[in-house]
Amino acid sequence: MAVVAMWKCDRDDSMFDNKKDADAYDKMLELAESFTQFLEKHAAGISEQDAETIGLLLSKNKEQLIAACKGKPEVLLSLGEGDSEADSNVTELSAAG
Amino acid sequence: MAVVAMWKCDRDDSMFDNKKDADAYDKMLELAESFTQFLEKHAAGISEQDAETIGLLLSKNKEQLIAACKGKPEVLLSLGEGDSEADSNVTELSAAG
C-alpha cells in the first residue's frame, strides 16, 4: 500500500495520476466552454446541449482546426478516416436539440 | 458607359469587382463547407441547416478560432462586444433544427 499523488480537474472532477495530463485536460475543457459560449451567443437558436457537444468536439480537435483555418481545410475532411483513435471524437447530439 | 471586369465566386455566384475580395470570399466558403462536413460527420444528429450555419460562423471568425486554439480562449468570449461589424456574424439557426 502507498499514498499516490493525484490531480483533479475541478471543472468536472476528472482525476489524473500526472499533472501534465490534468493540465492538458483542463485547458481542453476551458477551450470547449469558450466555444460553447461563442456558439450560444452567435448561433441563435442552438440548444445548450448541442452547443456543449460541438464545443467539446471543436476543442478536442483544435490542432486540426488551426491547420484548416491556416489554409488546409481538407484536414477536417480526412479526420477519423483510418484512424481508430479519432473515432472516439464522434459525439452523439441530443435528440431533444 | 464602360466595360468593367468582375469576378464571380462560383460556389454561390457572388459577384466582386476585384479579384482579391473574390478569392478571400471563395476561401471563406471553402473553409465553411469543410467545417460543415466535419460537423455532419462527427456531431451525430446535427441538422444540415445547423451544420451549414455553424460552418459559416466558424469560417468567418477563423482568426479568432486560431487565437483561441493557441491558448487565448477568451478571444471567443469578447467577440462582437462593442464591435458593430462583428454583429453581422450573429446567425439565426433554423427552428426546424
Image (cartoon, coloured by chain):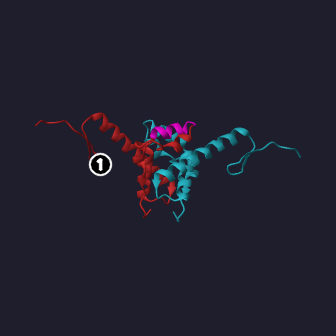
Chain colours: A cyan, B red
Q: Position of residue B89 (x, y in %)?
A: 41, 47
Q: Residue furthest right?
A: A1
Q: Residue furthest left?
A: B1
Q: How many marks?
A: 1
- Our reading of the magenta stretch's main secondary structure is helix
Q: Nearer the viewer, residue A45 or A63?
A: A45
Horizontal side of residue B89 vs A64, given as left or right:
left
Q: Position of residue A49 (x, y in %)?
A: 56, 58
| Residue drawn where x is 89% and y is 46% of the image | A1
| Residue drawn where x is 51% and y is 55% of the image | B43
Vertical position of residue A28 compared to residue B53: above or below: above
Q: Nearer the viewer, residue A18 or A96?
A: A96
Residue A72 highlighted magenta (yes or no) = no
**Whether residue A60 is visible:** no
Callout 1: SS: loop
* Residue indicated by mark 1: B12
Residue B63 highlighted magenta (yes or no) = yes
Identity of the amino acid at label 1? Asp
Q: Position of residue A75 (x, y in %)?
A: 47, 41
| Residue drawn where x is 50% and y is 46% of the image | A79
Question: Which residues are drawn in magenta?
Answer: B62-71
Q: Position of residue A97 (x, y in %)?
A: 51, 62
Category of crowding for the residue at label 1, using alpha-carbon neighbours closer than 10 angstroms: few (below 14), some (14–19), many (at least 20): few
Q: Nearer the viewer, residue A15 or B86?
A: B86
